[in-house]
């Protein structure tokens, strides 16, 4: 990394979806941006992502929606099924006039790699963005008008007017600035992956052909399925609560527990299990909402600011909203510190509400026994055009709208 006598104006730490989106938004707002990523190469691991209309609106604000839509699928319906009985609980019509009128942006499902690649390509094409891989930030020093970033791999120092910490769930910068310890493990774990759509047979093939997002809700477990990448791949995520959670150990949420927890589920769910990649399991974490995201000239963004359980499918969506709101604030304020403060103030409450809401939605999804019977009865009477309960999440946030 060249140590420049003319320090870059904004440094972004982390080249995930949040960091790339933030770099792009800031560059589009006129700032010179340097992004540093610890991995040797940019990339995403994991499988699919749902992007609700608030997320696709944010992608439009970043100028990459059309690019993402080239490979994303627009599912016609979001269907909630009972994982035990196999009966439909409720569904939302994602192509209805009511949906279009209310949200004005598509509901998309995409492979993470495809979304990440679209953001990376836009950053690479932007003359004000400089990208570095293989740079792990160890700590940051602030001296009033500048922030100095230090790295594991080199003695070079990156100096910037301000820093956006988009270094994810286990953010080092958050740990140093906020000091609120480790993320909280929910005792739930996910197995996820994609498989070629052509490999599926029977009921699974029929569900894949329908292009719907299928959520199979069961006692302390669920399964999510949807197509990605022009329908060529089928994404599956199996989630369950482990009875053997042990902090500081990986010996819980095992394959054997996965099989045990899914015993008694309907055929469609059982058929899906042998098709899961078992190479890696993903323990699921969140944190309590933070009171402040800005410390001096360093602002948190994405999972570093508001890690959430994935039950509302909003983590990446909120990171994208953060990025657009940051860009809007940078357009509005000539002073970068003022822009960071405005960004955080405008975003904090909504992200906190979604963090808490995700927790609650997980509880509804995983309820057992009589609770599940009540849930099914209550949701069963809903119309597929009734978006009242989810509208507050899916409606694009005002702070992401263009400055008038
Ligand atoms: P990350 O993706 O974690 O990126 C952080 C980056 O920072 C990484 O590239 C990392 O290498 C880098 N980094 C870390 N430390 C340093 C350092 N010290 N120096 C330099 N670089 C560093 N969200 C949705 O919107 N829809 C969904 O459907 C959805 N489904 C999900 C399903 C599951 C099972 C899970 C676990 C999550 C899901 N999410 C979903 C959430 C979403 O994946 C995350 O919220 C999102 O990817 C966070 O992006 P980020 O850029 O903030 O963090």
Image (cartoon, helix red, strand yellow):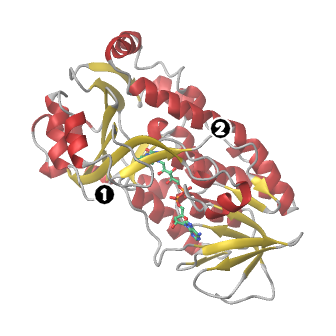
The disc placed on residue 111 is: none
Q: Nearer the viewer, residue 278 or 24?
A: 278
**Quadrant (top left/top right/bottom left/bottom right) for the C terminus:** top right
Location of residue 367 by image quarter: top left
Q: Secondary structure at mark 2?
A: helix
Closer to the camera: disc 1 or disc 2? 1
Percent of width and height locating residue 339: 82, 56
Location of residue 143 by image quarter: bottom right
Q: Is residue 340 above or below residue 108?
A: below
Q: Is residue 337 above or below residue 308?
A: below
Looking at the image, which residue is at 19% across and 50% down? 197
Location of residue 369 by image quarter: top left
Q: Which residue is mark 2?
A: 352
Q: Is residue 156 above or below residue 283?
A: below
Percent of width and height locating residue 238: 30, 41
Residue 306 seen from this side = yes
Q: Is mark 1 within 8 Å of ligand 1?
A: no
Percent of width and height locating residue 69: 43, 52
Q: Is residue 333 above or below residue 81?
A: below
Q: Secondary structure at mark 1?
A: loop
Give the total of numbered labels.
2
Tags 1 and 2 touching, CB below 8 Å: no
Q: Is residue 37 left or right of residue 385?
A: right
Looking at the image, which residue is at 73% across and 59% down? 177
Determine crowd level at label 1: few under 14, some 14-19, many 20+ residues with C-alpha closer than 10 A: few
Real-space Cα distance between discs 1 and 2? 29 Å
Residue lying at the far left in this picture: please name it.
Answer: 202
Q: Which residue is mark 1?
A: 280
Percent of width and height locating residue 211: 28, 39
Q: Is residue 298 left or right of residue 248?
A: right
Q: Nearer the viewer, residue 347 or 205?
A: 347
Determine crowd level at label 2: few under 14, some 14-19, many 20+ residues with C-alpha closer than 10 A: many
């Amino acid at each position: 990394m060249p140590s420049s006598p003319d320090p870059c104006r904004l440094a972004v730490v982390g080249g995930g979806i949040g960091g790339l989106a933030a770099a792009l938004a800031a560059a589009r707002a006129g700032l010179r941006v340097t992004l540093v990523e610890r991995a040797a190469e940019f990339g995403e691991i994991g499988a699919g992502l749902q992007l609700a209309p608030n997320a696709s609106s944010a992608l439009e604000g970043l100028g990459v929606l059309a690019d993402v839509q080239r490979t994303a699928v627009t599912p016609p319906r979001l269907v909630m099924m009972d994982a035990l009985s196999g009966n439909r609980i409720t569904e939302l019509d994602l192509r209805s006039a009511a949906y279009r009128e209310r949200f004005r942006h598509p509901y998309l499902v995409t492979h993470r790699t495809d979304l990440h690649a679209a953001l990376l390509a836009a950053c690479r094409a932007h003359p004000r963005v400089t990208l570095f891989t293989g740079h792990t930030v160890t700590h940051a020093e602030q001296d009033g008008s500048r922030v100095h970033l230090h790295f594991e791999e080199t003695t070079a120092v990156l100096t910037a007017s301000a820093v956006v910490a988009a270094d994810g769930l286990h953010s080092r910068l958050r740990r140093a600035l906020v000091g609120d310890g480790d993320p909280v493990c929910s005792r739930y774990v996910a197995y996820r992956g994609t498989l070629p759509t052509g490999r599926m047979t029977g009921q699974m093939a029929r569900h894949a052909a329908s292009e719907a997002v299928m959520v199979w809700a069961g006692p302390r477990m669920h399964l999510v399925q949807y197509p990605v990448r022009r329908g060529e791949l089928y994404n599956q995520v199996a989630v369950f609560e482990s009875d053997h959670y042990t902090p500081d150990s990986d010996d819980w949420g095992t394959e054997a527990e996965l099989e045990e927890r899914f015993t008694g589920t309907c055929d469609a769910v059982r058929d899906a299990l042998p098709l899961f990649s078992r190479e890696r399991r993903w323990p699921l974490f969140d944190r309590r909402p933070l009171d402040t995201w800005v410390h001096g000239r360093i602002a948190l963004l994405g999972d570093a600011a508001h890690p959430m359980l994935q039950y509302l499918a909003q983590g990446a969506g909120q990171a994208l909203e953060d990025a657009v709101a940051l860009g809007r604030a940078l357009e509005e304020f000539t002073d970068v510190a003022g822009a960071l403060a405005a960004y955080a103030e405008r975003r904090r409450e909504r992200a906190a509400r979604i963090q808490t809401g995700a927790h609650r939605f997980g509880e509804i999804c995983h309820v057992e026994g009589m609770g599940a019977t009540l849930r099914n009865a209550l949701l069963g009477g809903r119309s597929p055009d009734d978006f009242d309960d989810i509208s507050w999440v899916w409606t694009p946030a005002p702070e992401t709208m263009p400055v008038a």
